[in-house]
Image (cartoon, rainbow, N blue to C red):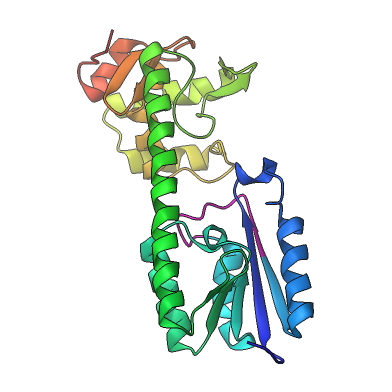
């Protein structure tokens, strides 16, 4: 495929990839720009997604690239797993490319979508990438379950409202803990989640992320046993090493009996 083709260069790193030699955004970009120069291809644009998973399409630059699909003829990546780690999403992408008369090239695998063999081999490699991703996910889940069973640290993503992390441990933030107690108290008195959220907004109290409170954020707090001093992961529930901000009785008045795994 020679000549003046317009190329969309796509590069991606996830958190894990950033530490791997040769996988940085700059390293990927340098190799792909060099191959374009060698083949006489015109670089239409470079789309860089940093800290984004390849298992979904919710990536800013990926979305921008396809919104500008008329600007380029070839989608160029360093490796197959830079663009997708999910065979369903990859197939959907290829359908979009085919409908718009675009080609796909992966430098490392040397795939050419204009041939039947290239399409067949590409599908096999993509399924292998998905298998690897799913196996990594399984190992992470096993590790998290073991962590929950042993009662080591907090589970879940982000820092829960009412706490901050200090030396890897959850430490109570008094002002936020008081808001948590207010939420449980108001709900136990019969106020709806919507009403509680509205009252917090009217009191100029913001959520952990600085956003307005809503029904979902109130519900998340009311049903989280973390505030009663427990850690939950899937079906594992046990006392945690952190300080509770409400009593078990207060939590159970909203959620019913609190069981645990010893």
User: Does the magenta-highlighted stretch encompass residue 9?
Assistant: no
Nearest the viewer among 3 and 85 is: 3
Please give left or right for residue 127 compared with residue 253 in the image.
right
Find the residue positioned furthest to the left: 257
Task: Locate residue 48: give its quadrant.
Answer: bottom right
Give the image location of residue 212, x and y in percent.
51, 46
Quadrant assignment for the C terminus: top left
Q: Main secondary structure of the magenta part?
A: loop
Q: Is residue 139 left or right of residue 106?
A: left
Q: Residue 168 versus residue 14: which sits nearer the camera?
A: 14
197 or 13, which lies in front? 13
In the image, 56: left or right of 261? right
Q: Residue at x 63, y 87 (%)?
A: 1
**Where residue 197 sits in the image (x, y, percent)?**
42, 40
Work out whether 135 lies above or below 142: below
Residue 53 in the magenta stretch? The answer is yes
Seen in the picture, residue 55 relative to 221 is either above or below; the reply is below
Q: Residue at x 71, y 76 (%)?
A: 45
- Residue at image point 44% right, 31% down: 156
Question: Up-down: is 93 above or below 99?
Answer: above
* Residue 112 rendering spot, x and y as whole percentages: 53, 78
Q: The magenta stretch spans which residues?
A: 48-58
Q: Is 169 left, or right, of 195 in this rendering?
A: right
Seen at 35% across and 23% down, the residue is: 232
């Amino acid at each position: 495929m020679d000549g003046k083709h317009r190329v969309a260069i796509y590069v991606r790193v996830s958190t894990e990839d950033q530490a791997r030699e040769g996988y940085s955004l700059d390293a990927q970009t340098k190799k792909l720009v060099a191959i374009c120069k060698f083949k006489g291809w015109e670089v239409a644009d470079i789309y860089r997604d940093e800290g984004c998973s390849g298992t979904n399409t919710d990536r800013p630059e990926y979305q921008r690239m396809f919104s500008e699909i008329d600007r380029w003829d070839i989608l160029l990546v360093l490796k197959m797993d830079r663009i997708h780690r999910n065979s369903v999403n990859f197939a959907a992408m290829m359908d979009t490319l085919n409908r718009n008369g675009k080609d796909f090239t992966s430098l490392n695998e040397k795939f050419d979508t204009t041939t039947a063999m290239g399409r067949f081999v590409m599908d096999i490699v993509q399924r292998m990438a998905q298998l690897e991703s799913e196996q990594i996910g399984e190992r992470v889940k096993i590790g998290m379950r073991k962590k929950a069973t042993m009662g080591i640290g907090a589970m879940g993503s982000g820092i829960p409202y009412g706490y901050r992390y200090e030396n890897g441990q959850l430490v109570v933030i008094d002002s936020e803990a008081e808001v948590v107690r207010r939420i449980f108290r108001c709900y136990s008195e019969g106020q709806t989640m919507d009403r509680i959220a509205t009252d917090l907004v009217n009191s100029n109290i913001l959520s952990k992320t600085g956003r307005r409170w809503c029904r979902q954020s109130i519900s998340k707090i009311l049903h989280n046993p973390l505030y009663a001093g427990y850690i939950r992961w899937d079906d594992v529930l046990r006392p945690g090493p952190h300080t509770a901000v409400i009593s078990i009785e207060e939590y159970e008045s909203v959620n019913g009996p609190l069981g645990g795994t010893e």
